[in-house]
Image (spheres, rainbow, N blue to C red):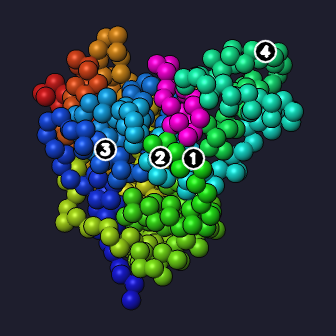
């Protein structure tokens, strides 16, 4: 018999799986808590936009509150690394043990060097390996200088306008032949041979059958989300739907997943058998546009009635809510959304726009004000400034002044 769940129960299972259902600990989170939280999520999406903070730092703040970002940096830089960069849900930091499972799924991405003539491509691939085998990690521009490669690119060249070295290098990254040993201050990748980056060199050469990879990653996706549809589970690691469907069937047969019916959902849903149903959700968090809780927009809408899109690439005049808008989770509702900017020169956290959601709890402004003060402190900013944009702005400005 299929279990029937209310929408509230489904929400709490989802929030519990993502570590967002509980009240966060007070004080500064420890390095151990940072590591455990990353392990629970399996990945942190990377993005170059730094208007507030680099995107991979924000999910840990949402779940832990105050923490030292150096703890997270050390996971990716201190040997043995606990966090490496690869394609997962787009470019992401992942647990190193996931690399062999993600690697065979990247064939669809192996087009970066297709515009480079074959002989040049193979020559550059070989020379890049030689240079990286005998050097410290290098950026793409540093590698180009080491190789002495120069080329004139057409003004109308398409895409990212990468030169041949960058294209071959990115192709090698996608194939798992080179990896990122770190990032520069300007967020450029520092490339190294994969066997030098992985904490266990065997990860670089381990071959995993694609069907086993789909099964493994689908189970992790279901575990990280607690509950969802086939599309939800496929989206977490950007898996194709057909093999994910096969994996879901195998996981049901193995007893890892169960079919459930969620009131109000038309699509079939599944629950990981080890997921927990919290008695109530008590968390509070500002969620990055790249937070794993909001990856799959249809899931977000189905769970919370919250329609959300990133407007970073939307022309300013056409934006509805702002440039870098974060949903505000309050207990088990998406109560508001705020457009945030860190004005580092003036040491202010700017709230460019603040909008409440229909049915938002009465204490939304007060709770959001407290969360903004906490975020400002975490970012090393002295003040929170609420601009008069949005229906929540007046109440939020008053609440901030009372904090």
Placement of 18 over or under 352, stated as above or below:
below
Whichever of labels 4 and 3 marks the residue nearer the N terminus, that label is 3
Q: Mark 2 — residue?
A: 200
Element marked by disc 1: helix
Q: Position of residue 202 (x, y in %)?
A: 53, 50
Secondary structure of the residue carrying tag 4 is loop
Name the N-terminal-most of marks 2 and 4: 4
**How far across and down, in percent of the image, does residue 389 sit?**
36, 28
Instruction: Give the residue pinned by disc 3.
Output: 35
Q: Nearer the viewer, residue 147 or 395?
A: 147
Residue 96, placed above or below residue 302:
above
Between marks 3 and 2, how big is the CA–CA gap?
18 Å
Question: What span is in magenta?
Answer: 179-197
Name the quarter where the C terminus is drawn: top left
Label 2 environment density (alpha carbons within 10 Å; few <14, some 14–19, many ≥20)? few
State the residue at coordinates (80%, 30%). Answer: 123
Q: Quarter-wise, where is residue 78 in the image?
A: top left
Instruction: Identify residue for label 4.
Output: 150
Task: Name which of mark 4 and mark 1 comes first in the sequence.
Answer: 4
Quadrant in which the N terminus is drawn: bottom left
Query: Residue 365 appears at what percent x and percent y?
Result: 22, 38
Q: Earlier in the sequence, mark 3 or mark 1?
A: 3
Left or right position of 156 against 57:
right
Q: Which mark is residue 213?
A: none
């Amino acid at each position: 018999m299929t279990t029937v769940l209310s929408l509230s129960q489904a929400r709490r299972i989802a929030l519990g799986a993502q570590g967002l259902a509980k009240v966060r600990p007070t004080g500064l989170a420890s390095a151990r808590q940072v590591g455990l939280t990353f392990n629970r999520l399996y990945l942190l999406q990377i993005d170059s936009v730094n208007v507030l903070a680099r995107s991979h730092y924000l999910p840990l703040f949402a779940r832990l509150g105050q923490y030292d970002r150096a703890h997270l940096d050390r996971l990716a830089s201190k040997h043995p690394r606990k966090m490496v960069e690869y394609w997962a849900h787009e470019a992401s930091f992942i647990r190193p043990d996931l690399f062999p499972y993600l690697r065979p799924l990247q064939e669809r991405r192996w087009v970066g060097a297709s515009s480079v003539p074959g002989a040049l491509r193979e020559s550059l691939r070989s020379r890049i390996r030689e240079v990286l085998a005998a050097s410290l990690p290098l950026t793409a521009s540093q590698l180009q200088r080491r190789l002495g490669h120069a080329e004139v690119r057409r003004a109308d060249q398409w895409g990212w306008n990468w030169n041949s070295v960058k294209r071959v290098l990115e192709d090698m990254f996608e194939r798992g032949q080179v990896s990122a040993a770190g990032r520069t201050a300007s967020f450029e990748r520092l490339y190294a041979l994969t066997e030098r980056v992985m904490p266990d060199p065997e990860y670089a050469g381990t071959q995993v059958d694609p069907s086993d990879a789909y099964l493994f990653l689908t189970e992790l996706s279901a575990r990280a989300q607690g509950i969802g549809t086939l599309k939800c589970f496929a989206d977490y690691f950007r898996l194709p739907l057909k093999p994910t469907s096969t994996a879901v069937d195998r996981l049901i047969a193995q007893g890892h997943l169960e079919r459930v019916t969620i009131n109000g959902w038309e699509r079939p849903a599944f629950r990981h058998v080890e997921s927990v149903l919290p008695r109530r959700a008590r968390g509070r968090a500002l969620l990055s546009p790249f937070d794993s809780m909001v990856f799959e927009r249809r899931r977000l809408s189905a769970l919370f009635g919250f329609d959300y899109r990133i407007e970073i690439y939307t022309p300013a005049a056409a934006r509805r809510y702002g440039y870098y808008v974060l949903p505000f989770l309050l207990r088990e509702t998406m109560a508001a959304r705020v457009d945030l900017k860190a004005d580092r020169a003036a040491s202010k956290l700017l709230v460019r726009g603040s909008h409440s959601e229909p049915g938002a709890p009465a204490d939304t402004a007060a709770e959001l004000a407290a969360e903004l003060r906490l975020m400002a402190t975490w970012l090393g900013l002295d003040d929170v400034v609420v601009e008069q944009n949005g229906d929540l702005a007046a109440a939020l400005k008053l609440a901030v002044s009372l904090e």
